[in-house]
Amino acid sequence: MALWIQAQQLQGDALLQMQSLYGQHFPIEVRHYLAQWLEAQPWDAIDLENQQEEFKAKRLLDGLIQELQKKAEHQMGEDGFLLKIKLGHYATQLKSSYDPCPLELVRCVKHILYTEQRLVQEASNASSPGSGPVDGTPQKYQQINQTFEELRVMTQDTENDLRKLQHSQEYFIIQYQESLRIQAQLSSLASIPPAERVQRESGLQSRKSTLEVWLTREANTLQKYRQELAEKHQRTLALLRKQQTVIIDDELIQWKRRQQLAGNGGPSEGGLDILQAWCEKLADMIWQNRQQIRRVEHLTQQLPIPGPTEELLTELNGIVTDIISALVTSTFIIEKQPPQVLKTQTKFSATVRLLVGGKLNVHMNPPQVKATIISEQQAKALLKNENTRNDSSGEILNNNCVMEYHQTTGTLSAHFRTMSLKRIKRSDRRGAESVTEEKFTVLFESQFSVGGNELVFHVKTLSLPVVVIVHGSQDNNATATVLWDNAFSEPGRVPFVVPDKVLWPQLCEALNMKYKSEVQSDRGLSEDNLVFLAQKAFSSSSNNPEDYCNMTISWSQFNRESLPGRNFTFWQWFDGVIELMKKHLKSHWNDGAILGFLNKQQAQDMLMSKPNGTFLLRFSDSEIGGITIAWVAENPNKAGERMVWNLMPFTTKDFSIRSLADRISDLNHLLFLYPNQPKEEVFSRYCTPPNCMHVFSCRQKCHHMTVCLIVSTVAVT
């Protein structure tokens, strides 16, 4: 309810924007009387692209109707009677509107709450210029909004000047017609008597001379008005182009970069509502200026006056068309990317959106979007405007979709829900490149017109690079290609060029981002963890983090060459750790129970200073996706001597049978988790409940026998 209280305090344009959110699709009275309930519901938890979430949306719709009916029933008295009828009517209306498509209600309410939050935030920023950004909103946003206000004033100014010019020209034409009428009268004097002719001719000549002087002077004034107006339009278009550069080349590119990093597990790229609002303002102002320039052109054609204005207007018309074309083509974007590891014969989805589609009324004749998969070489040719002869590198089923307009949010988008890659045509591989290093992209294209077919646009946009696989076993190598590309590609690159070598700290950032996302943990990779990874990647023994700061790691070292003495690469080992953690050991990592990134010698050095029965968990060096238990105990072959033992690594297959907590509970000689925590304090809450223990009784006996065998023969990990 706090948001609604703040929203009611908005003023001026912000208040009008807020009020425009409401209407028959969602009455403002519903927002007012159910403010607390609306703001408390989990609208953001519902994925609008997932039809299976419709039951959640239906639950929210039913809840909304019930709340409205309840509120109506509690209205008393004369005033309450009218409100009771009104709220009951709204309940019926909303049920009728959204019962067939409850996800549209969620879309509508999410848009309303998000926009209100943005307007309140912007108003708060404007009223506190000396304070920092609210909720992370950059100061740059304020500058963008100030520029829009400046553009609004400039556009209104040229509109006023244009009306003034139009009125002046209309009066000029009237006077010009009057001069023609006088000339016609003079010509007709020959047919009347000389005495009368002289008298009338004198008066007409006098009026004609006066009018011609006025017309000459006024023609110069009109030319001056036209020139001044054209120069004002020149300045407005220059500022519009500058503002568009900030929004498209800075803000939208940054959004796309965040979207790309989100593919590596980075923070969500955020919504597009603010960007769409800016792009719509741009479209509105560009179109207004375009119409003004066309009106001036019409006035010029209506009354040609020799001078430089016509040439300048032609130039302005070209500039404004270039600006609107750049805006439209740049705002045809992929809101939801197709999966970057794409398996053939498997359904996938994607969403494309035209940010200015609603404002330019493109939805009045909804365009169709087509999706095609193309190779890296075809993508390069496309960006060079070379004729690709409609080539593709495969066949996508269900690859056509009509753009839909959502009136409640003002968005025009196409939701491809059931695409499937039927086949792929691979190119000849270069050198040591494997199929999981070959990059493709999904090309989305459409054609539509605006302004009553005044302008026709053929728009195209490319997805982030995708790697096509035919079997699940190729997934981890394909993921490596995607991770490297997402992390190290530069904006505006030639498709899909990435550096072959990067600094080790850069890779560390990418690995940490991926790890935290996959394991769903705030506990990322520590400096010690990263040193361990550096030792593995570079076959180094240095424990000093600074030694690795300026070192570079190549793609080959990352995922082409096997680690020394192993049959797997650095990435394959790291990806195995991720898979193990996210499937079975997430909670233990978050608890800090797993040290993980230690080698055998480090584990031995740490345990030898601790009491017998102290143990730790580390990732296996010899097996992908393996974790081993190391513990310190007496050497049964030499009295008085202690040694560190290592169990054979456990893998996902083992934990699918019995959990880590249960396995540690089974081993009575494990007493303290390093450095000194009793194991019961750490693992007991994850153990199988006693009433389920009978299921595992036989399995436990077998396991204990296996443990005894392993303990007697120290495993190599």
Image: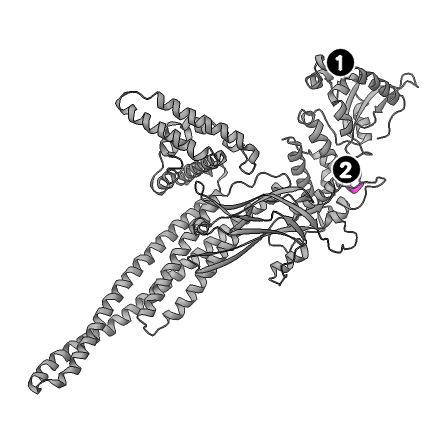
Q: Is residue 152 left or right of residue 641?
A: left
Q: Residue at x 38, y 49 (%)?
A: 149
- Name the chief secondary structure element in magenta: helix
Which of the two residues, 353 or 280, is positioned nearer the viewer here? 353
Q: Quadrant of residue 198?
A: bottom left
Quick check: can you spot residue 443? yes
Q: Is residue 62 left or right of residue 384?
A: left
What percent of the width, then of the height, locates residue 640? 89, 16
Kind of residue at badge 2: Trp
Q: Residue at x 28, y 71 (%)?
A: 220
Above or below: residue 1 compared with residue 574: above
Q: Are marks 2 and 1 in contact (CB under 8 Å)?
A: no
**Earlier sequence position, callout 2 versus callout 1:** 2
Q: Is residue 126 left or right of residue 399?
A: left
For numbered disc 1, what is the local secondary structure? helix
Which of the two residues, 206 or 105, is positioned nearer the viewer here? 105
Q: Quadrant of residue 700?
A: top right
What percent of the width, then of the height, locates residue 239? 43, 56
Q: Which mark is residue 694?
A: 1
Which of the two residues, 233 or 296, is positioned nearer the viewer here? 296
Kind of residue at badge 1: His
Q: Which mark is residue 573?
A: 2
